[in-house]
Image (tube, grey):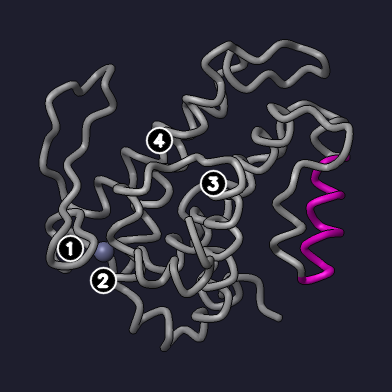
Amino acid sequence: MSLFGLGRNQRTFRPKKSAPSGSKGAQLRKHIDATLGSGNLREAVKLPTGEDLNEWLAVNTVDFFNQVNLLYGTLTEFCTNENCPTMTAGPKYEYRWADGEKIKKPIEVSAPRYVELLMDWIEGQLDNESIFPQKLGAPFPPNFKDVVKTIFKRLFRVYAHIYHSHFQKIVSLKEEAHLNTCFKHFILFTCEFVLIDRKELAPLQELIESIIVPY
Ligand SMILES: [Zn+2]
């Protein structure tokens, strides 16, 4: 299987991030690979017995970031300022960028710029050791789950844009099955740990309902 079409398009959006929390992260990664390998996504998202919830959220957050990065990376030549002058998810939803820190008042930017700002912001969180500690046993901040929730809310918007604006291109790149599997895994994880508000999921509600029964 060609990995996410990387063979066709070597230009990745940005380098892959490695798992946090050193050897512990690596161990949890192995668990994810093993359960994903079994093909049971519903089982794969569950917190393994005896493991720390924050560690589990951290490792998976890095994985989901990397997946979205690779998926979007195959679309960078199609998702341009000209083709996608605003960050939309279908005709009814348009996103404006604000990070709540540097940019407080939402600004209208093109979809590629929005995704760039969004992925930069997430990368900044992942690289911040006071939020995503690299050392085994280093404490997570009290608001860790809130940060994870914001990351998931934002990653969802990239999926929403890809499905609404670039799905035909995904089909022509033969990445449809891979996109659907990544999204299904992402949504099952989101549901398991209640990471995204229901109203945020509205742009892909039908697709989500076909994946999950009740949310
Ligand atoms: Zn686009």
Sequence-wise, the earlier of marks 4 and 2 is 4
Separation of residues labelled 3 and 4 (CA atoms): 11 Å
Residue tagged 2: 165
- Amino acid identity at mark 1: Cys
Camera-side residue of 141 and 4: 141
In the picture as drawn, the residue positioned furthest to the front comes out as: 214
Residue tagged 3: 65
Sequence-wise, the earlier of marks 3 and 1 is 3
For ligand 1, which image quadrant applies?
bottom left
Q: Tell me where residue 22 appears, x and y as whole percent.
A: 81, 28
Left or right of 179 on screen, residue 168: left
Sequence-wise, the earlier of marks 3 and 2 is 3
Label 4 CA crowd tier, 10 Å (few <14, some 14–19, many 20+): few
Residue tagged 4: 120
Query: Is ligand 1 closer than 8 angstroms to the Cβ of mark 2?
Result: yes
For the residues bearing labels 2 and 1, Cβ distance under 8 angstroms: yes
Residue tagged 1: 84
Which residue is depicted at the point 77% across and 71% down?
39
- Amino acid identity at mark 4: Asp
Sequence-wise, the earlier of marks 2 and 1 is 1
Quarter residue 138 falls in: top right
- Amino acid identity at mark 3: Phe
Q: Tell me where residue 186 appears, x and y as whole percent.
A: 55, 55
Query: Is ligand 1 closer than 8 angstroms to the Cβ of mark 1?
Result: yes
